[in-house]
Each structure stands twice: as structure tokens, then as C-alpha cells.
């Protein structure tokens, strides 16, 4: 969180650039290869442990090319500039799990296996659902998902699911769902689930669930505040329902 906060400060771009420049030889095209079009953490940063990449570039054992990929070829990768990079091996990486490839691009998918979710015989369209606390889908019982934080990664969702399971065991509940039988407020504004500019997110943003304006329908992306409400907050609220066998609806 401290690194994220520092990256979002006023001098974020220049600091990252200056650190890279200090580790590279004189005359290296820093602004071409190490000055991105976006501010740090508006998209993900590439971490360089111990500066090994800079050391390899300085020694001449490695080189860097900054461009966009037009397509793969039989011998490597064709860039938008027309240059072809010869390659024996191509490693794709996105930061999030790459679960779907279409036209040489990667897209994020909520269920990485591509499994179809069905409730009461009706397929669930994720884009028509709201994300409860950023980890459950409205109207889908006994399920949870995790997208992690844009600025960090943690197991807070797993902890919350364990709290729910323990509560269900103690109360004799067999089903949990959100929202309860009361429908969602039709006046609630819907927004994209993630405010993140990475291409693999933006290409699939219309297929992901929506978020609201405020908690619990709007993920906060701040670990400390989430820790208080997820670890110590009430499980039962106006949007969560636990059902016991043969229990009559309220």
C-alpha cells in the first residue's frame, strides 16, 4: 500500500523515469522505453527485482524494443512499425490471468475456465449482475469470486468466505444469497467494476459485473478499510440472506 501511495503522488512519473535512467548507461533512450503513456498504477508496473534487467541492458546481454504487436509470424512477432522480432520462444503476460485469446489479444474473464453459470435453469449474464463487496454476484447463491486488488493482492476474500461457512454451520443455514428476496434498487447507478486502463480489462469490461456508488455494492480497493468490515463487520445485512431448510420467507 505504501508503494502504491507513493506511485500515485505528484512526481510519480518522473521518479520512475529517473530511477531507470540512473541504472542505465549514458545515452540510453529512457524516454522511449521507460516512460509509459500512463501514470504508474493507472496500469500495472513491471517489477525488476535487484535491477537485473538494467544490468543486462547495460552489459549488452539484453535489449529492449517498445512497440505494439501487430501479429505473430512463422518466425517471431511483427510489430506495428513493420519491424519483425525473430523469436524462438514468446512468453505472453498480462498481469491478470490470461484466460481468453482472440485475434492475438488477451481478455480478462470472471470464470477463467469459461464455465457457464446457471441459476434456476437460466444462464447468468455477468454484465447484468451487481458485485456485492466485490466478491459475490447479485442473485447467485452460494458462490464467491476474487479479483484481488488493483494495487495489491491478498486473501481477504477467502477469509470472508470462511466466516460465511462457519456462520452457516452455526445457524443451520444451507443457502446464502445476495441480494435477499427484495430486488435491487432500480435507481442504483451502475458503473464498470474496475477503473483500470489495461487493455485486457478494457476489452472485456462490458462482460464483467457492475458496481454501485457505495459499499457494499462498490469495491473500495483499500485493504485497511476492507479488513475492518470483512473481518469484523456483520455478515447479515439488507443485501445478504441466509436460508435454513424449510424456513418460511420473511
Image: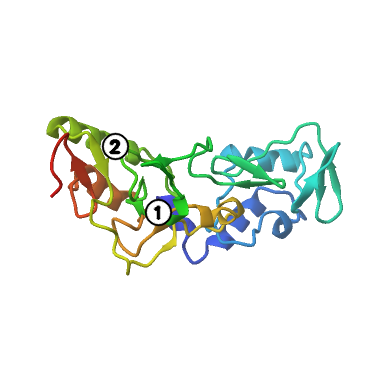
Which element type, helix, strand or loop, lies under badge 1?
loop
Q: Find residue 105 and report its horizontal and vertical position in percent.
A: 67, 47
Is residue 41 among the parts visible in the rendering? Answer: no
**According to the image, label 1 marks what residue?**
129
For the point 52% across and 57% down, the residue is 206
Occupied quadrant, residue 220: bottom left
Query: Circles 2 and 1: CB distance less than 8 Å?
Result: no
In primary-sequence order, the first of circles 2 and 1 is 1
In the foreground, 233 or 6: 233
* Left or right of residue 134, residue 20 in this image: right
Q: Is residue 180 visible?
A: yes
What residue is rendered at 34% in x and 44% in y? 140
Q: Is residue 84 left or right of residue 248?
A: right
Q: Is residue 83 above or below residue 52?
A: below
As drawn, the residue found furthest toward the bottom would be 187
**Disc 2 target residue:** 161
Q: Position of residue 112 (x, y in %)?
A: 52, 38
In the rendered image, the vertical position of residue 231 relative to residue 181, given as above or below: above
Amino acid at each position: 500500500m505504501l508503494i502504491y501511495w507513493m506511485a500515485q503522488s505528484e512526481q510519480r512519473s518522473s521518479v520512475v523515469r529517473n530511477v531507470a535512467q540512473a541504472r542505465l548507461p549514458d545515452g540510453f533512450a529512457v524516454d522511449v522505453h521507460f516512460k509509459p503513456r500512463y501514470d504508474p498504477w493507472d496500469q500495472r508496473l513491471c517489477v525488476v527485482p535487484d535491477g537485473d534487467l538494467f544490468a543486462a541492458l547495460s552489459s549488452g546481454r539484453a535489449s529492449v524494443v517498445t512497440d505494439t504487436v501487430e501479429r505473430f509470424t512463422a518466425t517471431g512477432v511483427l510489430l506495428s512499425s513493420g519491424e519483425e522480432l525473430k523469436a524462438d520462444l514468446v512468453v505472453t503476460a498480462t498481469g491478470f490471468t490470461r484466460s481468453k485469446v482472440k485475434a492475438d489479444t488477451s481478455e480478462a474473464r470472471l470464470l477463467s475456465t469459461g464455465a457457464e453459470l446457471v441459476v434456476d435453469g437460466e444462464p447468468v449474464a455477468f454484465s447484468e449482475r451487481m458485485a456485492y463487496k466485490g466478491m459475490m454476484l447479485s442473485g447467485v447463491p452460494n458462490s464467491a469470486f476474487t479479483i484481488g486488488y488493483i494495487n495489491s493482492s491478498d486473501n481477504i476474500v477467502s477469509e470472508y468466505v470462511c466466516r460465511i461457512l462457519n456462520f452457516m454451520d452455526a445457524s443451520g443455514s444451507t443457502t446464502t444469497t445476495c441480494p435477499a428476496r427484495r430486488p435491487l434498487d432500480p435507481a442504483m447507478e451502475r458503473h464498470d467494476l474496475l477503473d483500470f486502463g489495461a487493455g485486457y480489462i478494457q476489452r472485456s469490461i462490458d462482460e464483467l459485473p457492475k458496481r454501485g456508488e457505495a459499499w457494499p455494492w462498490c469495491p473500495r480497493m483499500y485493504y485497511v478499510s476492507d479488513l475492518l468490515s470483512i473481518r469484523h463487520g456483520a455478515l447479515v445485512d439488507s443485501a445478504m440472506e441466509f436460508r435454513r431448510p424449510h424456513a418460511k420467507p420473511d
